Every structure is written in structure tokens, then in C-alpha cells.
Image (cartoon, coloured by chain):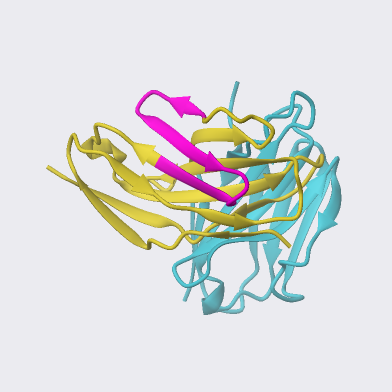
Amino acid sequence: AQTVTQSQPEMSVQEAETVTLSCTYDTSESDYYLFWYKQPPSRQMILVIRQEAYKQQNATENRFSVNFQKAAKSFSLKISDSQLGDAAMYFCAYRSAVLGSRLTFGEGTQLTVNP
Amino acid sequence: DAGVIQSPRHEVTEMGQEVTLRCKPISGHNSLFWYRQTMMRGLELLIYFNNNVPIDDSGMPEDRFSAKMPNASFSTLKIQPSEPRDSAVYFCASSPDRGLTGELFFGEGSRLTVL
């Protein structure tokens, strides 16, 4: 079974600075998706960024980018120019590319943004 | 297009009572997922359906929990009888198979408190 590990239960960053959240995963598959979801206090799960495993280029969405290292099974999230609204719980997640498969989450990293 | 709709948003009940949580997935989505979120255990997949058929219910804690998907636009998660340890936020999510991006779309969650 696939597993996702986030080794940083909590992280903090100063407003306008850059922070990187770590994620590793374990799988024997070659085709899959990786995601970062954000969960603010409102508890809504919001997709931040997505990476297809077959793509070598790292995904980028505005201030959010990933460092995808397929061989190392590592998928970190970099948040640049951090804003107060970025404060949330961040979940790394894995999903097989097989149709109708499950999404497996990591334990989450609580990000605090200090003004 | 409306997102995933869950009801109720909040439920407070007494131990031993029956609880029914409801979910309407996004129209056209083939897969539907029920997750439970607690501080201790994080996000756990309880069960998921593909084309209304349960694919994996290995995450259902015990016989007190049951889930149904009678049609493509409706699912229920029932707990009978409820216990205080069932207190959690229950999320429903859906995803399409075609035009697969892998992403799950989440509802706002149902917060259950069992006294």
C-alpha cells in the first residue's frame, strides 16, 4: 500500500519570506499523481498544486511551486512571499493513476505565518 | 457548477443515537469518497465508490458504520449506534474518471459531536 509521510508537524515563516514543506511517499507504481491540499480554519480542503508523475517539469502555481524528485520519492512544497492567508494545515497526498483509485494523505503540516 | 454538497454541517447527538450524513457529489463525477478527520488519526479514508459500487470499505471502523450510494447523485454515511469516539469531521469528496486530473473535490465537511 502507498504511504505518504510529512515529517514536519509544524512550521512557521515570517510574512514575505519563503518556506518549504517536506513530503515523501512510498509506492511501487510508475504512474501517479501528487497533490498539496490546504486546510484553513474554515476546514475546507483546497487544492494548492498538482503534479503528474510522468512530467519531469515541476509544477508551479503563482507563489506555490514543488520540487518533485521521482527517484527519491520526494515532493516538497515551496511557498514564496508568504502571506498571512497562507496560514493553514497543509496535506501532501498521493493518488494512483489507475481509474477510480483512492487518495492517500500525509499527516499534515501546520503552517504559521508571523506578521 | 455547485461543488460537493454535504449535510448537515454540524450535528450534535447523544451516544446511542443514529446519525446519517449526506453527500451530493459533483454531477458527472464517477468516484465518491468518505473521509474522517480527527486530531489523533488525521484524515482516514472510510470507503469509496466508483460508479455507485463500493470499491474499498476496509477503512470502515466497525459494523456500526455503513455507507450507501443508491444513485450517482447521492450517498449516505450512517452510524448506528453512535459513540463519543465517533466525534470527528466527516468529509465527502468526488472525482471524475474522464479528463482525469486526479484531483478530489471536497465538500465542506460535517462536524459530528457525540455526547
B109 relative to B30 in the view: left or right: left
Please name the predominant secondary structure of the magenta segment in the image.
strand
- Residue beneath the point at 61% across and 30% down: A56
> Chain A appears in which tint?
yellow
Residue sitting at the far left? A115
Residue occupying image coordinates x 29% and y 55% = A11
Whether residue A45 is visible: no
Specify whether residue A60 is painted magenta.
yes
Q: Position of residue B109 (x, y in %)?
A: 52, 49
Residue placed most toward the observer, B67 or A46 = A46
Residues shaded magenta: A59-77
The residue depicted at 47 percent of the width and 39 percent of the height is A67
- The quadrant of the rendering that contains the N terminus of chain A is bottom right
Q: Where residue A89 sits: x, y (%)?
A: 38, 51
Q: Is residue A53 left or right of residue B31?
A: left
The reply to whether residue B112 is in sight is: yes
Q: Residue at x 47, y 59 (%)?
A: A6
Q: Nearer the viewer, residue B30 or B20?
A: B30
In the image, taking residue B95 as reference, residue A19 lies left or right, namely: left
| Percent of width and height locating residue B43 | 55, 60
The hue used for chain B is cyan
